Image (cartoon, rainbow, N blue to C red):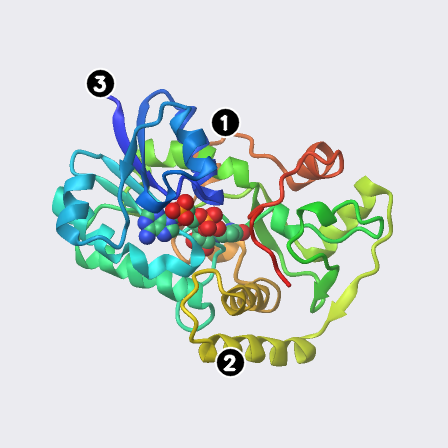
Amino acid sequence: MSRQKVLLLGATGETGGSILNGLLADKSLNVSVLIREASLEKPATKAIASRNVPIIVGDSTADVATLTSLVKGFDVVISAIDAASQLAQANLVDAAAAAGVKRFVPCGFMTIVPPGGIMLLRDQKEEINNRIFRNHLPYTIIDVGFWHILSVLALPSGKSDYVMLAPNANLFGDGNAPNLLTHLPDIGKFVAEIVKDPRTLNKRVVTWSDELSQNQIFDMMEDVSGEKIERQHVSEEEFKPQLAAARKAFEEDTSSEGMRLTSIMLHGSEYANSKFFRRDNTLENAKYLGYLDARELYPGFKPTTFREFLVNELLPGRAERPYPNLKIH
Ligand SMILES: NC(=O)c1ccc[n+]([C@@H]2O[C@H](COP(=O)([O-])OP(=O)(O)OC[C@H]3O[C@@H](n4cnc5c(N)ncnc54)[C@H](OP(=O)(O)O)[C@@H]3O)[C@@H](O)[C@H]2O)c1
């Protein structure tokens, strides 16, 4: 049987980089990447080229006819576009439908959260999903909970600061809301399994390694580090005005820059609200919303647990901070 042809958008990014590794490790897949012309000279693109991965030059905002010719012949198209650019997948969806792509994986890769005003990020992703449904385009929507590395708390010694975008030891509400977590490098390994699997066609799938509350994360970090972390309690009464302020600042920000500080603050606050106060990001909720459980589908794959990540990567200083070029002031 000929190898499945897969086109990946976002390979120079965090999620896309993990997906590229996962796809390339699977010899039954024939992988190409879609890279914007302006990014061809980036070190990340050169690193991809050095792995002999065919590069197709293109931008998801190109016109549908151009994109149709780019995606024609691919069995699977996967998008791992940045959070701020979700709606820029619209033409790619139309093109994939026109080209007869057999499976489109839109940019999910977030936590479990229902649509409808809870998180702007979810609502924009669902707008793209609805476009897929209107096109009757075969799809798989993959969500992953929250990344291990973004769930790290600041240790008093400062030993965990090197991976944190903004070091803190905040504990929201009672700290007991369970949350699904997936280690970023495991996302690609799950994706490689999912896109080959007929059971996941026209389905939503959730990946996870752990379901942990913040109290459990604090306890585990104290246990493996031997340090005592002072928990900075944030009550719902204190948090709600912060959420409202983040939403207002985002609405009032008219700058067009992709990764705006106001959008980072908005997503951060809406994630916290959804994960810790609403308790959306749970396995029970994923199943209620119709997701297949990747752990049940692939019982042979043992994803990296949060504890293994702490012991083998974070504490020995071997973890890599995501978004190395992003500065939060
Ligand atoms: N679950 C979690 O904890 C979590 C955490 C963070 C992010 N996420 C989700 O993961 C998804 C991916 O985010 P990320 O942070 O991994 O992304 P990222 O690192 O910012 O990378 C974005 C990628 O998209 C490419 N891209 C952007 N616009 C494009 C366009 N118009 N045409 C073609 N390529 C384009 C970029 O290419 P260039 O090299 O050209 O810029 C880059 O490769 C988002 O949906 C986000 O919601 C989830």
Q: Mark 2 or 3, which is nearer the eye? A: 2
Q: Mark 2 or 1, which is nearer the eye? A: 2
What residue is at 41 percent from the left and 37 percent from the top? 191
Mark 1 vs ligand 1: CB below 8 Å: no
Whether residue 269 is visible here, answered yes or no, is yes
Whether residue 109 is visible here, answered yes or no, is no
Q: Quadrant of the C terminus?
A: bottom right
What residue is at 40 percent from the left and 68 percent from the top? 256
At mark 3, the secondary structure is loop
Decide: few, some or many residues near mark 1? Use Cα within 10 Å; few <14, some 14-19, many ≥20: few
Q: Name the residue nearer the viewer: 215 or 12.
A: 12
Q: Which residue position is annotated with label 1?
A: 300
Indicate left or right for 39 with 281 as reference: left
Q: Tell which circle, 2 or 3, labels the residue nearer the N-terminal end.
A: 3
Q: Are marks 3 and 1 in contact (CB under 8 Å)?
A: no
Q: Which mark is residue 73?
A: none
When asked about the image quadrant of residue 89, the answer is bottom left
Kindly report the distance in space between the C-alpha atoms of the residues bearing marks 2 and 1: 46 Å
What residue is at 41 percent from the left and 35 percent from the top? 45
Decide: few, some or many residues near mark 3? Use Cα within 10 Å; few <14, some 14-19, many ≥20: few
At mark 1, the secondary structure is loop
Q: Tell which circle, 3 or 1, labels the residue nearer the N-terminal end.
A: 3
Decide: few, some or many residues near mark 2? Use Cα within 10 Å; few <14, some 14-19, many ≥20: few
What residue is at 69 percent from the left and 69 percent from the top? 173
Indicate left or right for 256 with 238 as reference: left
Q: Which residue position is annotated with label 3?
A: 1
Residue flagged by tag 2: what amino acid is it? Answer: Lys
When asked about the image quadrant of residue 69, the answer is top left
Q: Which residue position is annotated with label 2?
A: 248
Q: From the viewer's perspective, is residue 197 above or below residue 248?
A: above
Residue flagged by tag 1: what amino acid is it? Answer: Gly
